[in-house]
Image (cartoon, rainbow, N blue to C red):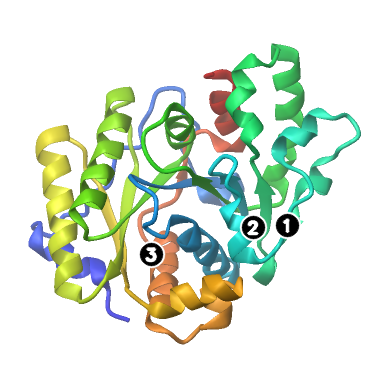
Amino acid sequence: MKDQAAKLRQLVGGKNFVGDLQETGSVNVDKKDNLPYIIAITSGKGGVGKTNFTVNLAIALSRMGKRVLIIDADLGLANVEVILGCSSRYTMMDLLNSDISLAQIILEGPAGIKYISGGSGIEQMSDLSVTTRELLIQKLYACETVADIILVDTGAGVGRNVLDFLLSSDEIILLTTPEPTALTDAYAVIKACRAKTDFLNIKFVINKIYDESEGIDVGMKLIETTRRFLQVNVSYLGMIYDDRNMTNAIKKQVPLLLSYPDTIAAKCINSIAKAVLQGDSMRVKRGWRGFLQRLIFSR
């Protein structure tokens, strides 16, 4: 497939707009140091295909040689399990039980990916004692030994739980569609993040497009609007064509890249996975341990 980002870069003067990763106190080291890279995948509104994209992106990255772990942080919905066609017995919060180990809550998925259910209990994490939260963190630390990339499937919108996950990650992938409401809500997510920090690494994907010109037009509007009104530089990752096989795959509970690997949407996701790995250097700001410390003790 053609480099979809090339046309967007040409339209904005050849620049590649990527958020500044230099943050005081950050780890800020290249991915070669074997720290897992944390990517939060989010959307401004529900129904844009976020979880479906997350699962298929994980499979694409796994096929490219990366060890991938998905954490379902779309609290209480367990949509990752639906798309994978599986059911998890335990959630992350079950680690508070001294008899439950990390290995027991990690589910083995297709194509070598791994999965952990966040569970709705995360919402009550602020009510836990410091000692209890430390216990949870200590058990979760071991995730960094099983994954090169950790994909956090967040909820939609700008609620506190969503923002906590976004601001604790090394990179944010924002999924939107060409619909005006979806774009407005995507802008709201960027604005909410910008209100919390100046150091953002936000990339976006446009889902459910009908032709390339539509995707380019939507991408340009999002780049220019966020740069002009928020002083935030967002980076374009790619676009995914509207494909009925997406719906068919969900009905079969078999991810698109496994059930319909030769379709246009599957090829788009593979292209985006390559962009994730081959684009700008993957730089870890805090590492997995820093992610957990910020997430759990910021509450």
Residue occupying the point 64% across, 15% down? 127
- Camera-side residue of 232 and 280: 232
Kind of residue sitting beneath label 3: Ala
- Residue where numbered disc 1 is placed: 87
Q: What kind of element bears circle 1?
A: loop
Q: Position of residue 289 (x, y in %)?
A: 62, 32
Cα–Cα gap, marks 2 and 1: 6 Å
- Residue where numbered disc 2 is placed: 81
Kind of residue sitting beneath label 1: Ser
- Mark 1 surroundings: few (<14), some (14-19) or many (≥20) residues within 10 A: few
Tell me which numbered mark, 2 or 1, is placed earlier along the sequence.
Answer: 2
Residue occupying the point 70% across, 44% down? 143
Note whether residue 147 is visible. Answer: yes
- Mark 2 surroundings: few (<14), some (14-19) or many (≥20) residues within 10 A: many
| Badge nearest the viewer, 3 or 2 | 2
> To which quarter of the image does residue 233 belong?
top left
The C terminus lies in quadrant: top right
Return the mark for residue 252. none
Q: What kind of element bears circle 2?
A: helix
Note whether residue 66 is visible. Answer: no
Tell me which numbered mark, 3 or 2, is placed earlier along the sequence.
Answer: 2
Kind of residue sitting beneath label 2: Glu
Of all residues shown, which one is farthest toward the bottom?
A: 262
Q: What kind of element bears circle 3?
A: helix
- Camera-side residue of 285 and 47: 47
**Above/below status of 59 relative to 73:** below
Cα–Cα gap, marks 3 and 2: 26 Å
Residue occupying the point 62% across, 35% down? 120
Return the mark for residue 275. 3
